[in-house]
Image (cartoon, grey):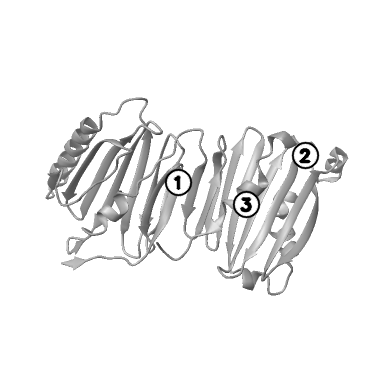
Amino acid sequence: MKNLAFDTYVPFAWQGIGLAIPSEWNPGKISGEANSGEARLDDSQIARLELEWKEARGDDRVAQIVDRYIEGLAKNAKKQKSRLRVERNPQAIDLDLPAMQNTQYFLWESRYTVHTLATYSPISDRLIFIRIMEHPDETLTPVLPRVLNTLRDTAPGEPYTWALYDLICQSPPGYELENFDLKSGHIGLKFERENTLLNIDRLSLARTILNNKNLDEWYMEFFAKSLRHMHVETDLQIRGPNLVLSVNGRPKSRWHGLLQPLPFWNTRPRQNLSGRVWTDLEANKIFAVQTFWKNSEDAPDLDACCADVTAISNGT
C-alpha cells in the first residue's frame, strides 16, 4: 500500500468556498455559479478531488441526502454487476469543522476508493460535497484531514476569495463572476455588478513577454479588443526591479462608430476605464486589474482590488 504524502499545500477557492490542497492538484474542470456548481482537481494520473455546492434554501437535512446518494450507488453497482463496499461514518479521520452543520463522512469502494464529505454551511445556506479519490493500492489517510478540515465558506455580501494555480485575489461584495479564462499561461477572471466590470488577469513568463517590448506596448496589444472603443492614457513607473503601469481611459465619440464597418450602431455601454498593470519578476508574472464604469461613484476601489491580487507561494 502506497502512503501518499505531500510536502506543500496551496489554497484553492471558488465562489466563496476554499480549501488547502496539495500543490500537485490543479483545476481540471469548473462550472456553475454561486448557487450551484462544481470544480474538479486533477493530478497527473486521475481526478483527485471533486467539490460540489448547491443552494440549500434552508433544507439542511444532509443525512437524508447521503442516504439517497448511497442508494443510487448501490443501484448503479447492481446494474453494472460491479462490486461496491460502503463504509459510513468511519472513525479513521478526525474532522474539525465547527462552522459547518450536520456533517456526514463516508467512503465507498468500486474501481477507486472515494472519500466523501457532505455538509451544510449556515454561512451561505449551501450544501457542500467533497469527494477525494485514491487508487486501491494507495492511501490518503494523512492527507484527508489536512484537506477537509481547511474547508471555509463565505457569507453573501462579503468579499469572495478566488485562488487557483498561482493566483489569489478577491472580488468586492455584489460582484458576480461573469466569465473566466483558464488558458496556458493566462488566468482571466471577469466580474460584473450591474454595468460595472472588474477584470483580473495573471500572465506567466513576464520576462519573456517583456524581452522585446515595453509593458505599456504589451498592454495595448494584449487588451486591444476591450480597448478599441476607448482613448487610453498610460503612465509607466519603475519600482525597484518591477514596472507599474497606471491606465485611464474614456469612451471615444459616438461619431467614431460611423467610421467602423457595418453595423455602425454601438449598443455597448459607454464606460470609463481605471486600471493598473504590474510585474512581479520574482514570480515571473504580470498582473492586470481593470475596472470599467460609467459613473465614478459606482467604480470599485482600484487600490483595494490591486492589494488583494498576488501570486500564491510554493506551498504552506
Q: Quadrant of residue 28?
A: bottom left
Q: Which mark is residue 263?
A: 2
Give the residue type that dot 1 points to: Trp
Provide the residue designation for mark 3: 306
Task: Tell me which numbered mark, 3 or 1, is placed earlier along the sequence.
Answer: 1
Whether residue 309 is visible here, answered yes or no, is yes
Residue shown at 17%/36% (left/top)?
Answer: 71
Q: Locate residue 146, reporting x and y percent.
A: 29, 55
Please name whichever residue, 213 or 82, is drawn nearer the observer in this view of the structure: 213
Query: How many numbered discs, if any?
Result: 3
Task: Tell me which numbered mark, 2 or 1, is placed earlier along the sequence.
Answer: 1
The quarter of the rendered structure image containing the C terminus is: bottom left
Give the residue type that dot 2 points to: Pro
How far apart are the alpha carbons under marks 3 and 1?
18 Å
Say whether residue 182 is left or right of residue 305.
left
Say whether residue 218 is left or right of residue 64.
right
Q: Secondary structure beneath disc 1?
A: strand
